[in-house]
Amino acid sequence: MVAGTPLGELIGTHASLEANDVVVISQKIVSKAEGRTRALSEVEVDAEATALAQALDKNPAVVQLALQESRRVIRADHGVLICETNDGWICANAGIDSSNVPGENTVTLLPLDSDASARRIRAELRGATGYSPAVIVADSFGRPWRIGQSEVAIGCAGLHPADDWRGKTDREDNELTATLVAVADQIAAAADLSRHKAAGVPVAILRGLSRLIVEEDGPGAATLQRPVAEDLFR
Amino acid sequence: MVAGTPLGELIGTHASLEANDVVVISQKIVSKAEGRTRALSEVEVDAEATALAQALDKNPAVVQLALQESRRVIRADHGVLICETNDGWICANAGIDSSNVPGENTVTLLPLDSDASARRIRAELRGATGYSPAVIVADSFGRPWRIGQSEVAIGCAGLHPADDWRGKTDREDNELTATLVAVADQIAAAADLSRHKAAGVPVAILRGLSRLIVEEDGPGAATLQRPVAEDLFR
């Protein structure tokens, strides 16, 4: 995967898409296609990153990149660096990842705007296949309170990332006051079940979710970011 | 669903199970079958709950039950009550839920031990069908930093809740140092995609996950609880 690869065109010509599919694409391959990779040996590490890396027992170049990619450090403790990225995602090391990246000491950064990536890939898929599947860009994030990672959506196009039941009624005619289902995240999680971590499967296609798919690109996964004023944990 | 219903037997006689299925069951129906429902009108509300309910603009009886079901309050602010339940789950209102529960002002509490529920249901399924599917008890939890809810596993039997890749290598022969996939949570999320919130579908069956299923009941979903000493957000 070289930088500049038209990922949607590539997927569209190799996958057998049907109407109303959801195409879930790993962040890593999107980042590679967008040139969002860095050689750690070429990173200039400043004093702040050096000190923080020492305190956390982390690679200084990774810490340097994480700080560059972030607008805020949420926690730096216990060997863990939780960042709020420049485009608003909260995750370890600003989403910088070295697994499944070829080349000694090469890492991927998150796409600059994963919703824009999803929209572009969707347009390329439409051009290649005639279909307009929903597209999700997914990454593995850790969670407070629970061990392990789960895939979440950091970009999406063609579906509403949250299925909003607030104000509607349940089967017992009770009003649902807080029910807002993060369907884009659940789709990302479901897609991850189709592979294991060394399988090298960067794309999964989910079928049967047509009730969630919309013609327009929709508001994007960034609308899943909880506004800081409503957030109790940063 | 009356208290005392043998849920596994009921599911086993109505569903067409196959070997290596995963049966995902909503917390709500498990709670009902275990008699974990309460009429809010019968709850005696003390002074602490009254004051907290007023501060949060919440139903005092719900707050009273949430405090009884919790060993610690994690946050009480912005109209939100985040609790650590007596068996270690961190969620809003200690998991107390009034949606899709018949009867004015009746709520469900979480099962006392959802892993024990999953093991018992699995044994009943085995008795009814001859198969030993994996069983997950799932509930919708909100998340810090991200809006909306996603289903997670609060109980499981017959699968390892986390798929541990730490110390293994990826396709590029890099060692994976932190990769631990919360597969039980991802399965719970995937199951939720098969229904909508007013569909009244309390059970979903997932097929094709045999690589994750084990003969023994395994360590249970409680092993997904991050120990407080390693947690940066409580």
Image: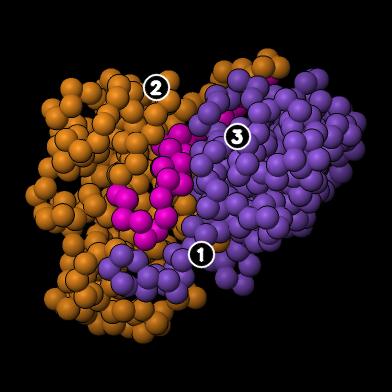
Chain colours: A purple, B orange
Q: Quadrant of residue B48?
A: bottom left
Query: What stretch of residues is rendered in magenta?
Result: B174-202
Q: Is residue B183 left or right of residue A28?
A: left
Q: Chain of mark 1?
A: A
Q: Which mark is residue A181?
A: none
Q: Residue at x 37, y 70 (%)?
A: A169
Label 1, on which residue? A164
Q: Secondary structure at mark 2?
A: helix
In the rendered structure, find residue B210 and report the number of the disc placed on it: 2
Number of marks present in the image shown: 3
Circles 2 and 1 on the same subunit = no
Q: Amino acid at mark 2?
A: Ser
Is residue B158 shown to the viewer in this render?
no
Disc 3 residue crowd, few under 14, some 14–19, many 20+, Cα 10 Å: some
Q: Residue at x 90, y 38 (%)?
A: A44
Q: Which residue is mark 3?
A: A205
Q: Nearer the viewer, residue B204 or B147?
A: B204
Who's the residue at 39% across and 29% down the image? B207
Q: Residues within 10 Å of mark 1 (few under 14, many from 20)?
A: some
Residue B68 falls left or right of residue B207: left
**Circles 3, 2 touching at the beta carbon (< 8 Å):** no
A87 or A174: which is nearer to us? A174
Residue B76, image x and y in percent?
43, 71
Question: Badge 2: how crowded within 10 Å, few (<14), some, or many (20+)?
Answer: some
| Residue at screen point 62% across, 47% down | A153
Eyeballing the image, is A107 above or below B46?
above
Query: Which of the two discs, 3 and 1, labels the residue nearer the N terminus?
Result: 1
Instruction: Tell me the amino acid under the disc marked 3.
Output: Ile
In the displayed structure, does residue B150 sit left or right of residue A159?
left
